[in-house]
Amino acid sequence: MHLELRLSEKSFANFDDLGFLKSITSGNTGWEFIPSPGWSLLVQVGDDLVTALPHGKVEVNMLGDEHAMSLRYRQVRAGDIVLPADVEVRWTLRDDLLSGKVNVMSLDPSLTLEAICLPDIILPCETDADVIVPKDIGWLLKNAFSVLFGNLDSPGEYVMHGDHIQMSAWIESTRSFYMDCRDTTGWTRRWNWLKAGDRQIRIRIDHLAPRPESSTLACFEMPYPVNLGARDGHWFSSASTYRQWALNQSWASRGRKQRSNYIGDIACWLWNRGSAEHVTAPAIELSKRLELPVALDWYWWHKHPYDTGYPEYFPPREGTERFMQVVKDFRKTGNFVQVYTNGMSWDMTLDSWDEGKSAALVTEDGSYWNVTYNTWVNRPLAHMCGRSKQWHDVVLGIAKQAHELGLNGLYLDQISCTGSRRPCFATNHDHQPGGGNYIMAGWQELLEKIRRQFPDMVLSSEGTKEHLLGSLDGGITLSTSFERVRMLPDPLRASSRPIPLAQAVYHGRGVHFGNVAILDGIPPYDEFWPPKPYDGPEQDWVKLCPDQFAFELSRTLVFGIEPMVAKLTMDHLQDERYAEDIDFLVRLCRFYHAHRDWLLWGTMLHPGECRCKRHDLASVTRDVFTPPEKAKITTRDMPGMLHSLWRSDEGESAVVLVNYSREDRSFSLIPADDLTVKTPTPSVSDSGDGVITGTVKARDMLFVPLRAR
């Protein structure tokens, strides 16, 4: 379903009866927007932040034909005050999308521009809806109106700072209202879903403006367009629309040939923490069982307790000589190792913090933006500004020391996850305070400096920020373990599901890995932390949640993400209680490695519809700093098996099915594309009416080549 659009001067002749989109779209979509100009400004009036809307008549100019027009506004209303302004808005019809840009050429000196808001629209909600949330690999917020606004306990709004992929959609049944930003340089912005009235949702994107030295210079032209349109109701249709533009951007230019490093060769990641013997022995043993290489993502190797002491990592906690020998011996086994560092944090309790202040991200009130992650120790970590040259020198020094230790892999935490969410108001950095693209440009420059100095250094970070895909070799994601680590006491997350949005857009052009699949359900505890602040015994999490580990691995695989196991020990590998899960891990990693042409480098296809028996999945929800008595057991109704469809670079299509449950499962698959089984087998066949049917054994996976029907 696409919008059929037309523009006419009559539609915009009078602001008072302007119905945004409703007046310029034909009625085939059924969308009925509340009359509005479709945009607004956020301005500061004294100490207050208010919305400014256009006021009075608008000057309309058709630009050549019915596919483009310019609207010129000479006044804005901020609260009860009408003030002079000069704002131009341009609308263009392109590829079934309405594309808009706003140029604030001048404002009254009493107003300070905070952001241009485009779109700013109000949409009646006749039914509940789902929202694509472009965080990490992607989330789908289910029943969004009820969750956000349904009762007194609802938050009433959802404000998201930044985005990893610049698109979203409001999905109602078989239709969706699609939005994207086509920003090629990484500006700061906010996405807002706000209650506007009874059964009305206000959708607004704030494009944060730089702060001029004087309000008389308050002019800001959006450097990129916003696109709006209608698509069918599946999230994949919106992803496909965005993909057509995204794959033509510079950050998507590194494909299989440009990513020839160990990340493309491994069968599994190990997210292990602690002493050398504790982390390397199980990695080597798993590699032997796989008969394939693995990569070790080594945490808690540094001299300070985890989430403290950054950016002071050296010497390693077991000494430089011991560490170098362990790395050398481990690499000789044919496996790979990278170490944890934090790419953007400085411990504010360190003596060196006086030095770090000048590189820190400064808020509008002059304080330093900081977060306390480690609730056992409670030491705040200040975020650094990506544009700070001083911080660049610090990170380059860390990379140099890591390289000298014999490492050829370096993990830089947070840069790709939270590194450009908020603007910086420092006056001593090489950027204008407030909104802009300077932070993203700074991270890109920093990563390029590391790559130039250490060309064999493989670089990764947390998250899927698209502007950094070309600068990083990989990114870890935790959302594949959504029920374990994302479902905190938050109605938004409790009503959300992860979707492979990043993979639907960028698979094959960016490599993502990871989950938090822990065999025993017990998070690791750093030996450098104080004694555990809780005495409660651990429960038998495996007995309580027998399918969680296998489910997390299965979701990782079908999403086209490199598999990972967290906190694997030799005790786990030798304990019969975990033998079934270890066997599943080994077979799944071999399966992944054998089908990397699809699952690592291929293109994700529309998943279609797969029907199978549902399954009540019990999961323990617990992060690193959750004591056992506060861990939650949640149960979710899930498909009994997971699936995805792929096409290799050679044009070969296939479906991947994984049965994570402990009983055989039959299925019927209706592909969205006109595909069928290439060679029927006793396990899988075509019923002849466009439906693929079959059975997957308990705790097993199936790869089925497909052909055009």
Image (cartoon, grey):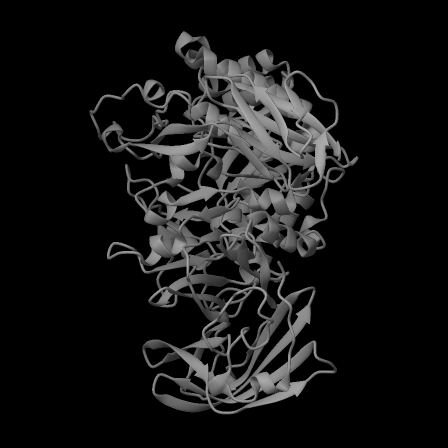
Q: Where 37 falls versus 591 (above or below)?
A: below
Furthest residue toward right: 650
- Residue 496 percent location from the top left of the image: 42, 45
| The one of 34 and 272 positioned closer to us in this rendering | 34
| The one of 683 and 625 positioned closer to us in this rendering | 683
Furthest residue toward left: 535
| 475 sits left or right of 120 in the view | right
| The one of 127 and 153 positioned closer to us in this rendering | 127
Q: Residue at horizontal 56%, vertical 77%?
A: 23
- Residue 170 percent location from the top left of the image: 49, 57
- Quadrant of the snapshot with the N terminus: bottom right
Q: Where 174 falls versus 654 (above or below)?
A: below
- Quadrant of the snapshot with the C terminus: top right
- Residue 492 percent location from the top left of the image: 37, 49
Q: Where 633 falls versus 501 (above or below)?
A: above
**Residue 506 is drawn in which quadrant?**
top right
Q: Residue at horizontal 27%, vertical 21%?
A: 539
| The one of 298 and 521 positioned closer to us in this rendering | 521
Q: How many marks?
A: 0
Q: Is residue 130 something that shows in the picture?
A: yes
Q: Is residue 601 something that shows in the picture?
A: no
- Residue 63 percent location from the top left of the image: 70, 83
**Residue 330 is drawn in which quadrant?**
top right
| 612 sits left or right of 199 in the view | right
Q: Residue at horizontal 52%, vertical 21%?
A: 665
